[in-house]
Image (spheres, rainbow, N blue to C red):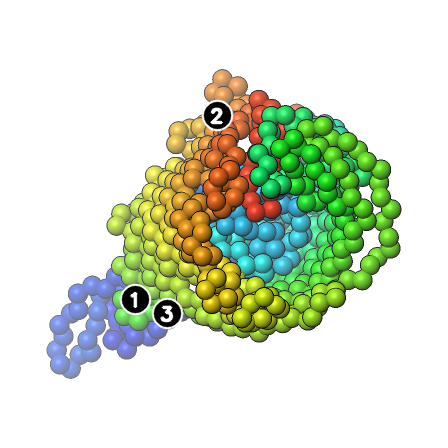
């Protein structure tokens, strides 16, 4: 909502017309922030005008242009961005979300989004660390980096790996969210992630961090922030990062990554502007690949894998540049118009060996491919939000329009094949790679319009959110040596959500919300409806839960059900269509905060039943979906050593249950538990604050398959030591 100054309007003896005028003035303040005290009316003679006792109208000042403040303990925020609803506190949000802070990112020495979301029991990374790209699951459904928003807009973060050194918050929203955020570019339905960029703070920042990670990755990170102007209206924040060296995976795996980002902002009385831009380069050699099974091969023994089985000449080379502008203007004290526009350019070059389909002995033969991809995206939104009252009901209304477009070109050429073994890898000769091949083109465009109304009653003890978004999806693909395909479909996605606060620190919430996914076009032959196109498929969620805030420690619990449709050919009618369904039913419990002075906890668990409820011909009906564990659990703890000021010990345990490899549920990977340990020490020397950090991930050097998916098995990260020293100048 807009900035509000504290306003006090008092009338000792006022006429009724003056009172109406005062109430009209008060209506320009946030409806939920108005406090009125009206005394008894005084009986006067007929010749006198009716008067009332003192009337007081107050409005609190709201901080604008800043992220939600950190919660006790500093690891998570007290709220976050809830799509077009804007920033909301955890207790006022009728959905499940967690916002990880810059303090946690820095203390855990995280470099990518994958490092941050490892704290969340509902999220798992299904691609190897230092692989060609990151990919996640939320509540059992896949989410790629293209589902990660940057300051509220899709399509502006790097496609393959997202750095976090310039992030103030990493916000994880759980559940379908097309109404709140618009249709995700790749059709994720289990949730979304938003990156809130750093801004210059009121206090000057000049900070440098030197880092080391096993095997020999050295890095440096410079963070500088300043506010200028008579009242600090102008802000600038610069982050520059470089890392280079060999990773904990042996056999010639290395990374080289560089990031430069600039965040500018202006904070006026009515006008707020910001701009973010970055350039990111990431090159990895011998990136680890996922492993699939050949035929009836047995599950590989992860304990026998002692080194990287990727070829030392394979690589993943990515370059991304983006710019984003955002502004908002307070038309009145209760009405704000906003708009944002951003663009990104991505260029990607891979020399990869995949798929790796192993037999029972671990042997495989795989093609070597040169893969090139170009991406150019434009993402924007505009809207207006306002607030007003109708009797005892306060309204917060938001109108929003969004547009996303990506133009892409792919090229893939097979340049040879190699044979090797995952237990005893053999480095083969590097193949010759041809010049740039033809790049078939395509585009996706997503247009939408949404309206929401949050109705508040009884001093915001009851908050009901209603809304609907009309989404239009346009897709065109011109693959090499294949006919052009295209679609233009639209659909509506509603939401209804409620928060009830029976007590000051307790919120009971529930929601119904949907997501849209672009559906597969029917094959050109072999079915009764070749080339048929379908509207975006709707995924539906119903959720209910409770949140309890004890002041310095919060517990949340929710139960949910997500139903996602899928496509296959009906064996009776031979018609291709939206005939399948997967139903994920789960329970989530999360805890965060500082239950006692000097002790911080962060973690939780997710129990999940991912059932195949509609399958091709009824085969595998009722089975568990591939790669979905019935139990995920995380628990992280920090302890400030009382006798040694500035010294903190940290520990974290991550557990993932068994996961099936196939839909028949005849093969699985075992459960696993990983332990991480660390410490940090903060002290001052020569007037400068110095922070030393040390951590060891996977302390026992456990070898395990961390996740399974339809694309194969992901090998867990070996023991990795990370050291850093931060100096605040």
Q: Cβ–Cβ below 8 Å for labels 2 and 3? A: no
Residue furthest front as drawn: 572
Q: Quadrant of residue 233?
A: bottom right
Residue 275 in picture, x, y percent from top left: 65, 59
Residue 207 in picture, x, y percent from top left: 67, 38
Q: Which residue is mark 2?
A: 639
Q: Is residue 725 visible?
A: no
Compared across the picture, whether 303 is left or right of 673 comes to: right
Q: Which residue is mark 1?
A: 393
Q: Which residue is mark 3?
A: 388
Depth order, front residue of 47/103:
103
Callout 1 crowding tier (Cα within 10 Å): few <14, some 14–19, many ≥20: some
Which SS class for mark 3?
Answer: strand
Q: Quadrant of residue 513?
A: bottom left
Residue 141 in picture, x, y percent from top left: 50, 50
- Which tag, 2 or 1, sits closer to the chain's start? 1
């Amino acid at each position: 909502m807009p900035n509000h100054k504290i306003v006090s309007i008092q009338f000792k003896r006022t006429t009724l017309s003056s009172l109406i005028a005062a109430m009209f003035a008060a209506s320009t303040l946030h409806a939920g922030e108005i406090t009125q005290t009206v005394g008894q009316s005084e009986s006067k003679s007929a010749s006198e005008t009716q008067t009332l006792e003192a009337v007081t109208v107050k409005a609190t000042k709201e901080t604008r242009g800043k992220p939600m403040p950190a919660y006790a303990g500093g690891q998570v925020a007290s709220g976050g961005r809830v799509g077009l609803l804007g920033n909301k506190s955890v207790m006022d949000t009728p959905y499940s979300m967690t916002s990880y802070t810059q303090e946690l990112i820095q203390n855990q020495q995280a470099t990518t989004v994958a490092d941050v979301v490892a704290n969340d029991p509902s999220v798992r990374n299904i691609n190897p660390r230092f692989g060609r790209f990151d990919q996640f699951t939320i509540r059992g459904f896949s989410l790629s980096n293209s589902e990660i928003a940057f300051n509220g807009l899709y399509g502006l973060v790097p496609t393959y790996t997202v750095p976090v050194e310039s992030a103030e918050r990493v916000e994880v929203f759980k559940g379908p969210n097309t109404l709140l955020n618009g249709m995700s570019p790749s059709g994720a339905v289990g949730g979304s992630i938003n990156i809130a960029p750093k801004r210059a703070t009121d206090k000057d920042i000049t900070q440098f961090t030197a880092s080391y990670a096993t095997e020999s990755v050295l890095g440096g990170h410079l963070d500088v922030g300043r506010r200028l102007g008579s009242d600090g209206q102008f802000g600038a924040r610069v982050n520059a990062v470089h890392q280079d060296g060999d990773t904990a995976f042996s056999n010639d795996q290395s990374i080289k990554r560089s990031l430069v980002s600039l965040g500018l902002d202006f904070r006026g009385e009515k006008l707020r502007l910001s701009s973010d831009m970055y350039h990111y380069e990431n090159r990895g050699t011998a990136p680890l690949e996922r492993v699939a099974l050949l035929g009836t091969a047995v599950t590989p023994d992860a304990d026998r894998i002692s080194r990287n089985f990727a070829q030392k000449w394979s690589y993943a080379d990515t370059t991304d540049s983006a710019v984003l502008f955002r502004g908002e203007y307070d038309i009145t004290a209760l009405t704000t118009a906003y708009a944002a526009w951003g663009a990104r350019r991505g260029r990607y070059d891979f020399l990869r060996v995949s798929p790796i389909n192993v037999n029972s002995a671990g042997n495989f033969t795989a093609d070597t491919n040169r893969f090139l991809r170009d991406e150019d995206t434009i993402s924007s939104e505009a809207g207006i939000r306002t607030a007003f009252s109708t009797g005892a009901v306060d309204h917060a209304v938001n109108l929003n329009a969004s547009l996303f477009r990506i133009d892409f070109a792919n090229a893939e050429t097979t340049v040879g094949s190699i044979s090797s073994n995952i237990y005893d890898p053999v480095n083969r000769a590097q193949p010759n790679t041809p010049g740039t091949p033809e790049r078939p083109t395509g585009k996706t465009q997503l247009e939408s319009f949404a309206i929401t109304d949050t109705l508040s009653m009884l001093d915001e003890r009851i908050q009901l959110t209603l809304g609907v978004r009309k989404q239009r999806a346009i897709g065109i693909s011109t693959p090499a040596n294949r006919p052009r395909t295209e679609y233009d479909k639209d659909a509506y996605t509603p939401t209804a959500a409620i928060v009830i606060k029976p007590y000051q620190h307790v919120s009971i919430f529930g929601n119904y919300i949907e997501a849209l996914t672009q559906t597969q076009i029917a094959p050109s032959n072999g079915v009764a409806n070749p080339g048929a196109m379908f509207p975006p498929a709707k995924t539906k969620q119903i959720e209910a839960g409770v949140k309890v805030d004890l002041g310095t420690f919060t517990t949340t619990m929710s139960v949910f059900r997500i139903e996602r449709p899928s496509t296959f050919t009906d064996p009776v009618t031979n018609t291709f269509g939206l005939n399948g369904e997967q139903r994920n039913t789960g329970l989530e419990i999360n805890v965060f905060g500082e239950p006692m002075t000097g002790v911080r906890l962060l973690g939780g668990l997710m129990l999940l039943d991912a059932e195949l409820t509609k399958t091709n011909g009824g085969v595998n009906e009722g089975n568990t979906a591939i790669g979905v564990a019935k139990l995920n659990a995380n628990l992280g703890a920090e302890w400030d050593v009382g006798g040694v000021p500035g010294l903190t010990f940290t520990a974290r345990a991550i557990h993932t249950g068994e996961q099936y490899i196939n839909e028949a549920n005849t093969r699985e990977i075992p459960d696993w538990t990983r332990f991480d340990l660390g410490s940090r020490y903060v002290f001052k020397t020569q007037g400068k604050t110095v922070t030393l950090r040390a951590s060891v991930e996977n302390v026992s050097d456990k070898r395990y398959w961390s996740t399974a998916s339809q694309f194969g098995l992901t090998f867990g990260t070996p023991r990795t030591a990370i050291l850093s020293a931060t100096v605040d100048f």
